[in-house]
Amino acid sequence: MKNAIISLFMLTLATLLTAQNVAPQKEVFTPIRLGEVKPQGWIKTQMRQDLRGFTGNLEYLVPDLIQKDEIYGKDRLTHKVKSKDVGALGDPGDWNVQFLWWNSETQSNWRDGFVRQAFLSGDKAAQKRAKAYIESILATQDADGYLGVYAPDLRYKLTGENGELWAKATLFRVLLGYYEMTNDPKTWQALLKAVDNVLLNYPIHQSSPFKAQKPFAGLSHGLVFTDVLDRLYQLTQDRKYLEYAVFLYEDYSKNAVSEPDIQLDNILNASYQMQGHGVHSYEHLRPLTLAYWSTGNAQFKQALDVYLQRVQKLTTPSGGPIGDEWITQPRADATETGYEYCSIHELLHSYAVLLQKSGDPAFAEQIERTFFNAAQGARHPEKSGIAYLKTDNSYAMTGTKNGAGDPKQTRYKYSPAHQDAAVCCVPNAGRIAPYYVQSMWMKDADGLVANLLGPCQLDTDLGAKHVRIVEKTEYPYQNSFSFSITTQSAFVLKIRKPTWAQGITCNQAHQTENGYLKIAVPMGKTELNLTFETAVMAHTFAEKEHYFSYGALIYAHPIAATEELGKSFPIKGFYDWKYRPIKANTYRYIADHQAKFEEASIQIVAKNEQTQALETIRLIPLAKTILRQLSF
Ligand SMILES: [Zn+2]
């Protein structure tokens, strides 16, 4: 009897283990090497403009934070440094000490965007600057491999808030990008050595990098060191990087940190409300994603599903996630939810990782929604500047949210730097397009997959055979594409079919399968012409509001505004800009809205809330708006 019970117990245990399926999960798509997809059309034009604008000039716009602080070099932090200008609002000497690492984020996130844009858009002068920078940063590496912001007296020894892993994560993403685009062996060796230095000094399972007294933002940002580990694994196939990533997530989950949203116990607690600093909460999706795919652990999978549902509720119609800057509401609101440019970028990056690993085209749709609407809609349509914070319904951009609320708020305006708040969003505004471009194409077992659509050129190899695909389109401003394909071997091409596509016109034989068009491409040259047919769609949001889309774009009613020149900068032509509405007209949705698409705009009939009259109004893409009403 006893033996029978033991056998039953063993059987149950075995069943449970099998049910948990504890084995690394297969990643559905293989990422394409950075630089193999180059932007064309409007994306390239925008990158070139940004290189002449805020991305190309940030080091001159805020020289104190970049040029005058060699934080990875001669100005590394030691116990002697008590304060530093980090370009942020705050009481000097009071909480500045928490942020001594801050310029490393500003510098490296900025350079990550700058270096990627320089090579992707083919700007030779910017490439020269990028190369000089890489050489200067590699020169700061110590003999043991250390690359970072701390002098020997502090490195790996800090017991309080610190930026050890975060300063490295941001810098190593730059080095990875540069290496992938140039194949420079010196950068590659330096990077491998620098990562090994971390693995040696924070040994796996024998140290606790996230254990700290009074932990704060830098320590918790450090969890995305997993970005570097994920890519290094993809490039080397060495599982030590994945094992270390899982160790970091587990260590993060069990320590008292300032950003607890992603901790396993909190996700699995059904009554937990997300409360973090938005940008942290959205970037932390990636370490959890990686932890699940690296292990196949069922609890991580459950946590990932719960977390994604929570994030979905925090997202506005444009794809902007709550982050003003903390998550203080359980659900997004089109007028009240402010979102930070950093959060837009981090969420997009997280969805790109999820798309690559899961193969679920729903993530591609989220990325397009976020990039084409929230991200483009938080840029100034003509001048070089972005909104640090933005709302979908944007009724004033005078510093405060919709012209009201906290009078000390400065982030709701357009600036090429936002130095009076923090220089975090402008660097990330330079990163978002390169990260979009990098994920446009991926590989699978059969061939190539166009996951994110838009004008670009792909040059890659399938096995030893070269493939070039030139994708010509104005997408998402219109929905027709021509793909000119030149290939040395036959392959299967998959093109994502957006869920809003009601019909397809294609000159090549194709099948539709799991959200993709599947086309057998023969060796040689093929011209593929494709159009997605669609119509205006009216959506309900938060049960009481409505908004309109056509294709991948969301449309809004532009509000005429007066322009006010703000702060000027050390270089000519760069300013902060503020906007006030000329007339406070708002509109309400009516069921008989008679929406129609005409001349790149949507016309609807809506009720003027001031006069109660029915009027025909014209809605335009968010990318072309400053003040606007998106939901009715
Ligand atoms: Zn920011």
Image (tube, rainbow, N blue to C red):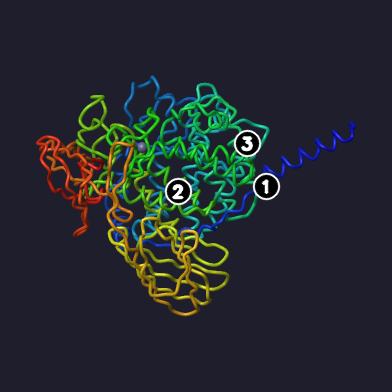
Viewer-nearest residue: 615 or 138:
615
Could you give the CA–CA distance between mark 3 and mark 1, rounded to whole angstroms? 28 Å
Q: Earlier in the sequence, mark 1 or mark 2?
A: 1
* Residue that extends furthest to the bottom in the rendered view of this protein: 524
Instruction: Name the spot of residue 404 as percent of width and height, x first.
Output: 21, 27
Please tell me which residue is depicted at 50% across the width and 22% down the height of the picture: 214
Q: Secondary structure at mark 3?
A: helix
Q: Say which of marks 3 and 2 sits in front.
A: 3
In the image, is residue 306 above or below residue 494? above
Instruction: Name the spot of residue 39 as percent of width and height, x first.
Output: 37, 61
Please tell me which residue is depicted at 62% across the width and 35% down the height of the picture: 202
Circle 1 crowding by C-alpha within 10 Å: few under 14, some 14–19, many from 20:
some
Q: Secondary structure at mark 1?
A: loop
Is residue 554 toward the left or the right of residue 276 in the image? Answer: left
Could you give the CA–CA distance between mark 3 and mark 2, rounded to whole angstroms? 24 Å
Is residue 142 toward the left or the right of residue 613 in the image? Answer: right
Please tell me which residue is depicted at 10% across the width and 37% down the height of the picture: 583
Q: Which residue is mark 3?
A: 201
Name the kind of residue labelled 1 in the image: Ala
Viewer-nearest residue: 287 or 330:
330
Asked whether mark 3 and ligand 1 are closer than 8 Å, the reply comes as no
Quarter of image, ligand 1 = top left
Name the kind of residue labelled 3 in the image: Asn
Position of the C terminus, as image quadrant, is top left
Circle 2 crowding by C-alpha within 10 Å: few under 14, some 14–19, many from 20:
few
* Residue that extends furthest to the front in the rendered view of this protein: 592
Q: Which residue is mark 1?
A: 23
Viewer-nearest residue: 102 or 69:
102
* Proximity of marks 3 and 1: CB atoms separated by less than 8 Å: no
Could you give the CA–CA distance between mark 1 and mark 2, rounded to whole angstroms? 42 Å
